[in-house]
Image: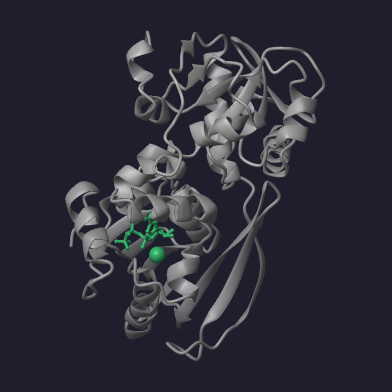
Amino acid sequence: MRARDAARAIDALRRGWAIRIVGLDGAIRLMAIEGADAVTLAAFDPQARADILISAARAETLKLANQLAAADPDLPVLVERAPWIDADVATAISDPVLDLASPLKGPFRARPLAAPQAAKAALRLARLAGILPAYFLTEGDEAVDVTVQADDIDAYDDAIHLAIATRARLPVSASETAEIIAFRSPDEPREHVALVVGKRDSSPPVVRLHSECLTGDVLGSLKCDCGPQLHQALHQIADAPWGVLLYLRQEGRGIGLVNKLRAYAMQDQGFDTVDANVRLGFAIDARDFSVAARMLDLLGMTQVRLLTNNPNKVAGLEAAGIGVIERLPIILPPNPHNERYLATKRDRTGHQL
Ligand SMILES: Nc1nc2c(ncn2[C@@H]2O[C@H](COP(=O)(O)OP(=O)(O)OP(=O)(O)O)[C@@H](O)[C@H]2O)c(=O)[nH]1
Ligand SMILES: [Zn+2]
């Protein structure tokens, strides 16, 4: 059960437990800095010798990039442990939101990575767990709570075992005859849903992929366009012969709610949505639309008319075998709070607005 080991490791990281990642080039023992305190750190690393693993982007902010031998932007950086680096300093090293409040100590020194494949997998695992990509790292063979192969983290794909769990009628304000279909995967606790609107016929459905946005969808946040887009999409689908809205549990473009809110805190400090993600150590867009393709596949839909301004959604579905026969724009007027966000999407992430 290889996906199960990755799922266990994700769970362990969120609980602050120690894990070991075994790569082709060696094994590393890790504990997430996020959630670590003096007590858990002492148990993990009694001699205070664990180094600190961070993303290349974070290392650049800490002025460590010039010490890197290989210029691989995806290769994490190992920061040598100094006596003054305790749990609080490690937190300041890992979290860019704190940079203004706690000017960083230094200088830091980078150390060569003994197990680069395992270290890269550790960063991917942090993203999957929704935590900051920063760890205490040792190469010792002391006990851990979970051991996982780097290959299993690389291959982790929550779409593979996705299946329809149940379906029911769900009248919504846009359509009284909608049906909700829930999907579940044993590898992933978050459940995706599809809302099928209108009477299914042989024409390609109008489809909207909506990524979860708690702040926009539920709280009416004005910082983004998610809430109004969600409702507009449902009405556009209701006006079409038929269609489906996929509600994907990809909060914060796949980095999770807490990390998205960290990105918002970075935006309060002047960074735009793209730079905030990068400075936190994540991809600009960490979503994988193959899960949406798998849902459409399970619904028997192979060709769609896609409601989006995002060319990556079109490309992602097509790469996963769904034919996008038409892209339909979804345009809403900006407000003073999301004007910059929408301009960034247009200018930096290729949105056709
Ligand atoms: N990381 C991050 N995520 C954000 C930010 N603002 C909104 N989001 C997330 O972005 C996602 C919304 O994107 P979508 O509306 O699905 O898609 P899109 O890429 O804008 O493309 P469209 O189909 O054209 O709307 C949601 O998961 C939001 O939580 C931000 O500043 N940072
Ligand atoms: Zn939003």
State the image coordinates of residue 206 (x, y, percent, origin top left): 35, 71
Judging depth in this view, the residue of 134 and 88 nearest the camera is: 88
Q: Examine the image and state in which quarter residue 27 appears.
A: top right
Residue at left offset 77%, top offset 20%: 46
User: Relative to residue 9, is residue 172 depicted above or below?
Assistant: below
The colour style of the image is one colour
Judging depth in this view, the residue of 112 and 217 nearest the camera is: 112
Most extreme residue toward the right, as rendered? 143
Quadrant of the snapshot with the C terminus: bottom left
Q: Examine the image and state in which quarter residue 242 appears.
A: bottom left
Judging depth in this view, the residue of 54 and 170 nearest the camera is: 54
**Ligand 1 - quadrant of the structure image:** bottom left
Judging depth in this view, the residue of 345 and 297 nearest the camera is: 345
Taking the image as drawn, is residue 283 in sight?
no
Residue at left offset 45%, top offset 80%: 197
- Left/right placement of residue 55 relative to residue 163 reads left
State the image coordinates of residue 253 (x, y, percent, origin top left): 42, 52
